[in-house]
Image: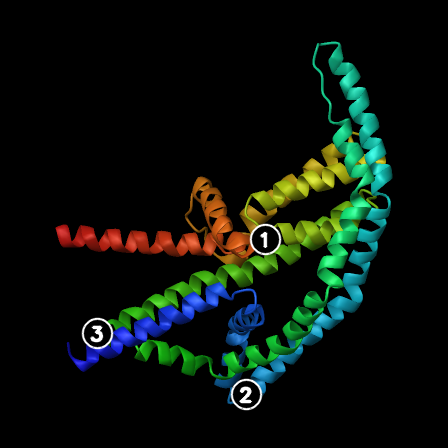
């Protein structure tokens, strides 16, 4: 075995070990992964600035400061309104449950005439008695535990630093990985990385913009029908729209429940249905094709399957990245199949 092969085997072992350790300690490495993700999003901006003869280190600092500034402005302007409406909603949650109990009681009486018995009121009573306890446990666990505080501080301090280093040395990191691939495969590896980058970047940057637009649309729509929690519903419906298919279902159910109980009128369900029907066509036929690009060519069943699979493997991150990952797999499946067909001929 020559020296070249030994070196490649050692590199493969080292890279595999790093990947295994990274997966095992993934919770501790969240600032690192988040920093890398932020750098990936900001890299095109920094690269364009570098092309205009602006120092890359300086442009990386400006890009990160600009992002932090945006997040701070968002935190002190929009986020307090969302939190306020969320708190008001939770305070009124017991009264909403009481209304729901009354609706279920009327429904059960009507169905008893047809010998159909439903007994969901006890579940609603449990919700009526326990939301405060559940909320208290969540707040204590995520905001007041010493581990949570330490994790939050380390996240806020380390993430910008990690992002800056990634942005500063992005080209060097890319060249390093390419150079450690056998020379005859380097061209293919470079092309493959570029193709994967196009798929992931167009989806992520486009989908975030689509979700922001949809969030604003939901807010305006709920505001015009007189919803008390229009900001709350718009914010969370926009976030849920990041999840393919399931997001709009969850948003519709949550919004329908809140709107119907607020107005005590089942007819408002038609307004909610109209809002989400329009959003479905707005996203599918206008926003996604224009912003993300041409349709990804995946059947809805494949998308649903990928959401389940990648969600089970990687949690909420897997759910969000299920579509681009499926697109990459499908793209290379077609590529391999095309090469096999050429070889047969």
- The answer to whether 1 is drawn above or below residue 234 in the figure is below
* Disc on res. 217: none
Sequence-wise first label, 2 or 3: 2
Of residues 142 and 201, the one nearer the viewer is 142
SS at badge 2: helix
What's the distance in space between the residues labelled 2 and 3, CA to CA?
33 Å
Q: Position of residue 280 (x, y in %)?
A: 60, 43
Q: Are marks 3 and 1 in contact (CB under 8 Å)?
A: no
Q: Position of residue 118 (x, y in %)?
A: 72, 20
Residue pointed to by mark 1 = 242
Which image quarter is the N terminus in?
bottom left
Label 2 Cα crowd, 10 Å radius (few <14 / some 14-19 / many 20+): some
Q: Is residue 2 left or right of residue 49?
A: left
Q: Is residue 64 left or right of residue 12?
A: right
Asked whether residue 26 is in view, the answer is yes
Q: Is residue 311 left or right of residue 66?
A: left
Asked whether residue 262 is in view, the answer is no
What's the distance in space between the residues labelled 1 and 2, CA to CA?
32 Å
Label 1 Cα crowd, 10 Å radius (few <14 / some 14-19 / many 20+): many
Residue pointed to by mark 2 = 57
Sequence-wise first label, 3 or 1: 3
Kindly identify the residue that appears in the image at 34 percent across and 66 percent down. 192
Kindly identify the residue that appears in the image at 26 percent across and 76 percent down. 8
SS at badge 1: loop
Residue pointed to by mark 3 = 184
What's the distance in space between the residues labelled 3 and 1, CA to CA?
39 Å
Of residues 193 and 126, the one nearer the viewer is 126
- The answer to whether 323 is drawn above or below residue 99 in the figure is below
Q: Position of residue 71 (x, y in %)?
A: 70, 70
Extreme-left residue of the structure: 345
């Amino acid at each position: 075995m020559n020296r070249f092969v030994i070196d490649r085997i050692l590199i493969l072992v080292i890279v595999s070990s790093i990947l295994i350790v990274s997966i095992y300690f993934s919770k501790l490495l969240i600032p690192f992964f988040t920093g890398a993700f932020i750098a990936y999003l900001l890299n095109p901006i920094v690269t364009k600035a570098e092309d205009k003869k602006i120092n890359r280190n300086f442009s990386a600092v400006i890009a990160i400061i600009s992002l932090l500034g945006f997040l701070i402005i968002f935190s002190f302007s929009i986020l307090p309104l969302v939190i306020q409406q969320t708190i008001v909603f939770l305070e009124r949650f017991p009264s909403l449950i009481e209304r729901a109990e009354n609706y279920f009681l009327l429904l059960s009486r009507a169905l008893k005439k047809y010998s159909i018995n439903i007994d969901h009121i006890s579940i609603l009573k449990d919700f009526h008695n326990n939301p405060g306890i559940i909320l208290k446990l969540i707040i204590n666990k995520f905001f007041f535990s010493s581990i949570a505080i330490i994790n939050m501080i380390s996240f806020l301090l380390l993430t910008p630093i990690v992002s800056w280093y990634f942005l500063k040395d992005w080209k060097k990191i890319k060249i390093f990985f390419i150079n450690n691939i056998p020379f005859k495969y380097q061209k293919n590896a470079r092309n493959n990385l570029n193709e994967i980058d196009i798929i992931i970047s167009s989806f992520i940057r486009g989908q975030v913009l689509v979700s922001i637009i949809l969030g604003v649309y939901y807010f305006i729509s709920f505001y015009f029908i007189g919803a008390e929690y229009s900001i709350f519903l718009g914010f969370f419906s926009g976030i849920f729209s990041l999840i393919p298919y399931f997001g709009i279902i969850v948003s519709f159910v949550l919004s329908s429940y809140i709107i119907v109980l607020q107005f005590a009128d089942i007819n408002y369900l038609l307004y909610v249905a109209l809002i989400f029907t329009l959003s479905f066509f707005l996203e599918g036929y206008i926003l996604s094709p224009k912003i993300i690009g041409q349709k990804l060519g995946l059947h809805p069943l494949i998308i649903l399957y990928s959401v389940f699979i990648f969600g089970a493997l990687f949690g909420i991150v897997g759910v969000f990245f299920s579509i681009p990952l499926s697109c990459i797999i499908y793209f290379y499946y077609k590529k391999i199949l095309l090469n096999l067909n050429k070889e047969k001929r």
